[in-house]
Amino acid sequence: IKSGARKIGSKDYSAGSCKTWKSYVGVYEGFDPLHQFGWADINRAFVSRYINYLRRHGYMPKVVNKHMTNLKALINAAFIDGVHDNQRAASLIVKNKIEDRDKAVEIYLTEEELQALYEMPLTGKKEHVRDVFLIGCYTCQRVSDYNNLNKDHFETTRKGTRIIRLVQQKTKTEVTIPVMNENLIAICEKYGYNIPKANEQVLNRYIKDILEDLSESVPTLKDKVPTNLTMKQKDALKKEGKEAETDLNGNVLLPRFKCVTSHTARRTGITNMYLSHKYDIVQMMHVSGHKTQKTFMDYIKLSSEELADEIAARTKKDSEMW
C-alpha cells in the first residue's frame, strides 16, 4: 500500500490510509508476534480472542471496532486475491454498537471561543498551529485536508464568491467550500496563501497547551466534562503518578481544553454551521463532503441542554409567526 504497488482501483492509498494500516499491523503484531494463526484459523474463537486482547490492553470500543473493521477488510481482500478460501471468516466480524458513554467526549468550540482564539496574541510554532486549526474550523474539513491547503485551492466563482475547491484525501470526494468567515481569508493572506503545515501529533499537543493558556481569559474552556480516557491519556497519568479526577458516579472529568484534538476543528465547523440556521442539510453536507445525513448528524455535538434550548427557540419562533 505504502509503495503504491497496491491501489484502490487505479488510485494510490492516501497518507491517512497508509498510517491506519501501519497502526493496524503494529497492534496485530502484538497480538500474534509468532504468526501462529493462518487464514484457516479465523473462526469465532479467534475473533473473540482478538477482541479480548484489544480490550485487555485498554483500547476503547471505538478503536476495537476500527481494528476489527481493518481485519475484515484484510480478510476480504485476501479472499478476492485468492490467498485463502475461508469463506466464513469475514462474516464472523460484526461491529458493535457504540454508546456515547463508551467514547471519549467529543466537544466543539463556540463562535465566541473561536474568535478569542483568533485574537489571541501568539508567535512561532504556537501561532502556526493555532492558525492551521482555525482553518479547519472555518472549512469543516479533516486534518488531512485543512493541513494541506495552498493557494491553488482558492478560487472565485463567476458571481464573485470566494471558494475553496479540493478533493478530500480520505474519501476522494470533491467539495466546494464557500468562505464563510473573513478570519479565514485574513489568516491565509498573512502567509501569502503558503499556509504552514503542522502534523497531526504536533497539532494535538500544541492546541491543548494553547487553549489551556486561553482558558485564563475564556473560563468556559475550563468547564469539566465527563469522558473516557484514551490509552495515551492513561499512560500519561501513570507516568506522572496521578489519578484522574472523577465525579460522584465515577466518571472521569477533564477540562474542555484537554478534550480538543485535530478532529475537533471539523466538528466545530459543522456544529457552528448548523447552529447558525443559515443553511439546509444539503448545503451543509456539500461543504462537509458527507454522503449520508446520518453520518453528517453525528458531527453535530450539542449537549442535551443545548438541544433543549434549540427546541425552545424554534418553538418560540413558530408561535410568534402564528
Image (tube, helix red, strand yellow):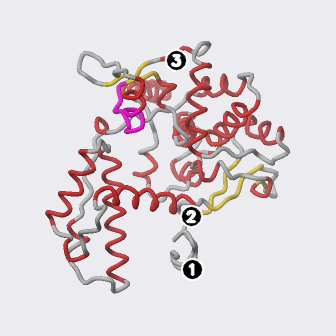
Q: How many marks?
A: 3
Residue 234 highlighted magenta (yes or no):
yes
Q: Nearer the viewer, residue 193 or 75?
A: 75
Residue density around tag 3, few if under 14, some if 14–19, many if 20 or more, within 10 Å? some
Which label sits on residue 14?
2
Q: Which residue is drawn at 66% across and 44% down?
A: 198
Locate residue 177 relative to residue 42 in the image: left or right: right
Q: Disc 3 versus disc 1: distance between alpha carbons?
A: 48 Å
Please tell me which residue is depicted at 33% across the width and 55% down the height of the picture.
30
Q: Tag 1, which secondary structure?
A: loop
Task: Measure the alpha-carbon separation of dots 2 and 3.
Answer: 37 Å
- Dot 3 falls on a residue whose secondary structure is helix
Instruction: Residue at 83% x, 41% y: name it.
Output: 189
Question: Going from the N terminus, do you reach mark 2 or mark 3 first?
Answer: 2
Look at mark 3 in the image and give the residue it sits on: 220
Horizontal side of residue 275 vs 76, given as left or right: right
Is residue 312 rendered to the left or right of residue 14?
left
* Name of the residue lying farthest toward the left: 45
Q: Is residue 260 above or below residue 151?
A: above
Provide the residue span drawn in magenta. Answer: 226-235
> SS at mark 2?
loop
Name the amino acid type tagged 3: Thr
Q: Which amino acid does label 1 sit on?
A: Ser
Amino acid on which the number 2 mark rests in the picture: Ser
Q: Nearer the viewer, mark 2 or mark 3?
A: 2
Q: Which quadrant of the figure has residue 28?
A: bottom left
> Which residue is disc 1 drawn over?
10
Write the residue at 24% across / 52% down: 96
Magenta-colored stretch includes residue 286: no
The numbered disc on residue 179 is none
